[in-house]
Image (cartoon, helix red, strand yellow):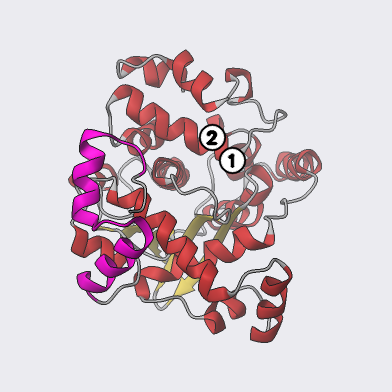
Amino acid sequence: MARFIGSHGGQADAVFSRAGVSEDCLGNPILALDLGAYCAMMELAAGETRHDNFGLWFGQQFQPHELGLIGEIALASPTLGAAVENLATLFPFHQQATETRFVREGEMLRLEYRILDGRILERRQDAELTMGMFANVFRTCLGRDWTPEEVQFEHPQPLDWREHRTAFDAPVQFAQRTNCLVFRDRDLGRRMPGGNLARLTGLRAHLIALAGGTGVTPFLDRVRAEIRSRLPEGAAHIEDVAERLGLARWTLQRRLAEYGIAFSALAEDVRRDLAEHYVRQMHIPLSDLAFFLGYSELSAFTRAFTRWFGLSPSRAREVWRSAPHRPQAM
């Protein structure tokens, strides 16, 4: 990480200090690293190097063995299919408060990844890094020319989005429910070059013992994450969120009431926080942002934003250009 930051003209020490991250924790599978601090480090690195696609290109050159135990587990798996399955099953032990799934959708397979901690708003660099790392597991087995059928990201389209197509040599979709690689159901039986069943068994046991569990994301933060993932498809509905959490609707309502908040209020909080975060990103058209937050038209988003902050989204952008602090409601 330090070398990559330096090679792009940044000061790694400044990034680590501001993020509250010790360089010793990076690349050491025994030392725990807070996910929020890690995501902040990646976003700060992008700012420090003035390289908006920092995570994208860091992930493209990041090899599985550099990922610690979870990377070694993928490499020691007997087949590519087993490597992908192990990534999906064990990644939450490597990085807690995340969800990784290996699922079928029609004729395609998907390796999905998302952060479950709803407090972490700035997560784009982490997502692009992770998709690159996952792709390199496939490339280790199938060669550097392997490409997915499609790549999906949960964040809106960035300014230099064409670089994403170049990096993966595949179509890329943004503002999706989750981050994922989409690929065909073939070659999963191909042998991994370093497959070693005895080593795999030991590595799995070591990772699980070190993690002590996959971590429990605080309930409200998990609900926030589920609300966020559904916004690009329209307003989040309590029935859908409850089903994803494995709860009955009334159970979700009761548990939220124990925290003194209703589902509708929590959904509005999520929209408000995301609205502030993304309105600051000047390259995103406000009409696209309205869609990303689940509004059917820009006027509905403008009314909501004005109610929250006392000024319209376009006016807020003018204010933030001159003074990048949160506007106070009128």
In the image, is residue 303 part of the stretch drawn in magenta? yes
Label 1, secondary structure: give it: helix
Give residue 277's mark.
none
Task: Please name the residue shown 47% across and 61% down the image.
Answer: 270
Outermost residue on the front side: it is: 330
Please, is residue 138 above or below residue 285 in the view?
above
* Image position, residue 283 (x, y; %): 19, 47
**In this orientation, does residue 159 appear?**
no
Question: Which residue in the structure is indicated by mark 2?
Answer: 38
Q: Based on the displayed image, in which of its 4 quarters is residue 5 positioned?
A: top left
Neighbour tally class for label 1: few under 14, some 14-19, many 20 plus, Cα within 10 Å: some
In magenta stretch: residue 112: no
- Image quarter of residue 250: bottom right
Q: Which residue is mark 1?
A: 35
Q: Nearer the viewer, residue 104 or 14?
A: 14
Q: Residue 18 at what x, y percent from top left?
A: 50, 23
User: Is 66 rendered above or below residue 249?
Assistant: above
Q: Is residue 119 visible?
A: yes
Towards the viewer: 207 or 234: 234
47 relative position to 195: left or right: left
Span highlighted in magenta in the image? 297-326
Mark 2 touches mark 1? (CB < 8 Å): yes
Q: Position of residue 213 (x, y in %)?
A: 77, 50
Residue at x 45%, y 21% (from the top left corner) = 15
Judged from the image, the secondary structure of the residue bearing numbered disc 2 is helix
Query: How far apart are the alpha carbons under marks 2 and 1?
Result: 5 Å
Tell me the kind of residue under disc 2.
Tyr
The residue under the point 34% across, 64% down is: 307
Secondary structure mostly taken by the magenta-highlighted segment of the chain = helix
Q: Residue at x 61, y 33 (%)?
A: 68
Q: Identify the amino acid type marked 1.
A: Leu
